[in-house]
Image: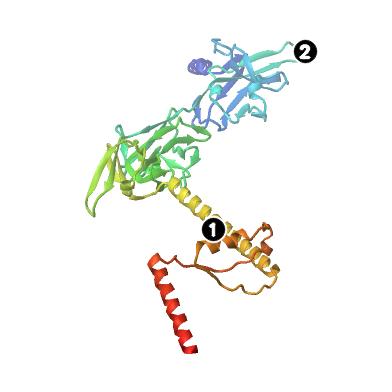
Amino acid sequence: MHCQYILQLSLLTLLSLPGTHFSGTQTWSVWYHDRDRTNVICASKGSSVVFACTYSYPDTMEVRRKIWFTPRGKTKQDGSQQGDGVFNTSGLTNKTRYSGRTEFYDQGNNCTLKLNNVTEDDSGRFFFRFEANKHKQAPQGYTGPLGVALTISVLSLKLNENGPVKERDHVTLACTSTCNLPQMEFLWFKDGCPLPGVSGVLGGQYPLGPLSSNDTGCYSCGLGQGMSTPILLDVRYAPRNVSVQVSPSPEVVKGSRLTLTCNNNANPAAETYTWFQRTGTLTSLRLGMGKEHTFKEIDSDDSGLYFCMAQNALGSQNSTELELKVKESAHLMVFLAAFGALFLVTAVIVVLYIYIKRRKWNRAEKKLPTKPVPQKATFSRPEDIYENMRRSAKPITDPDDMNYTELNIRPAPSHRRQLNNKAEDDDAVVYSQLQTQ
């Protein structure tokens, strides 16, 4: 009596076990388990998962087909449902997205399946079903109830700093997963590239600091081939590398238009710009505000040293000084150059003209015949001059026939002078006659 009670209790216990089906004294059963003896698997994207499985059936039957599938919609999960094929030993068509990603371990009562390169779309339950029959009988099918639940881990990354992050601050990146797997090794990336010297960090926390502007970027964490959504680490700092850019050139012609631009590197961008002109060793003149300062018509008095100051909420910095040199108008220089060139050309032409003329005169003098030097003719009376001119009846047209002489015209004597001269002549005649006698 006692033994019969124990046998009935054992049968009730076996019937209560999942995946157990009795056919006479032999059972139909499917057992799912992973390494932790649970029916839930959590994996990272891109990794491989193993659905450990064993099954049993009556010895009088022979297995004809083995199938792994995922249920369609809200079907029953009591061992009677079927669904979309993941793997099938009979060669029936499986879902396309599982093609080339499955490995089935078919040894004895082993029904383990390995699924490679898992994605978020693979999340859900997976079931094993087999079909067996006796000789010349219709096959009977059995599906292991409950199945195996696969969850793809979702990574999230947070920054333990709520306010703005500045230079020299210390922060920590915290990566969490929906899977609480033991000893998870996280990978860390900046702008999509692995961080140097970081192959795997346990615990999902990555400290950074003291920060500099070079730490600005998009950070993400990874587990297997899965990766979190990137977050931006924005390191803020005061203006730096402030400089003045001039257009068109620091050496400009008087009256030209000139623009000065204040360039800098800052985060956030500089809010105010101030321009100064150096007036002494320790003094300067404030010119105005704005990123650009423009001279519409620059003057000679604008020559000198200029600098700008860029400022944001974190600080300010002055640029190095830029020297402007204002030159005289280019129009005046062009005019003077043109005038000098014209004067030089004119002088050359005049010299050539005089040289050519002199050569012609020298040649003409060599052709003239040699003539006796005319004697000087002295005319004391105008009547003699006019008489001499009257006798030149033949006009002279050839320059070679012309004779030149020197004329000395004395002024006509007065009437008294003529009388005195006549008296002197008479006295001379008388004196001469006396000497003769």
The disc at residue 136 is 2
Q: Position of residue 139 (x, y in %)?
A: 71, 13
Q: Which residue is mark 1?
A: 347
Q: Amino acid at mark 1?
A: Ala
The mark lying in front, picked from 1 and 2, is: 1
Q: Position of residue 155 (x, y in %)?
A: 45, 30
Q: Amino acid at mark 2?
A: Lys
38 vs 214, left or right, is right
What residue do we see at 53% from left, 57% from top? 344
Mark 1 in CB contact with mark 2 (< 8 angstroms): no
Q: Would residue 168 be visible to someone looking at this image?
A: no
User: Which of the 4 image quarters holds residue 217?
Assistant: top left
What residue do we see at 61% from left, 72% from top? 374
177 vs 93, left or right, is left
Helix, strand or loop at disc 2? loop
User: Which of the 4 image quarters holds residue 177?
Assistant: top left
* Mark 2 nearby-residue class (10 Å; few <14, some 14–19, many ≥20): few
Mark 1 or 2, nearer chain start: 2
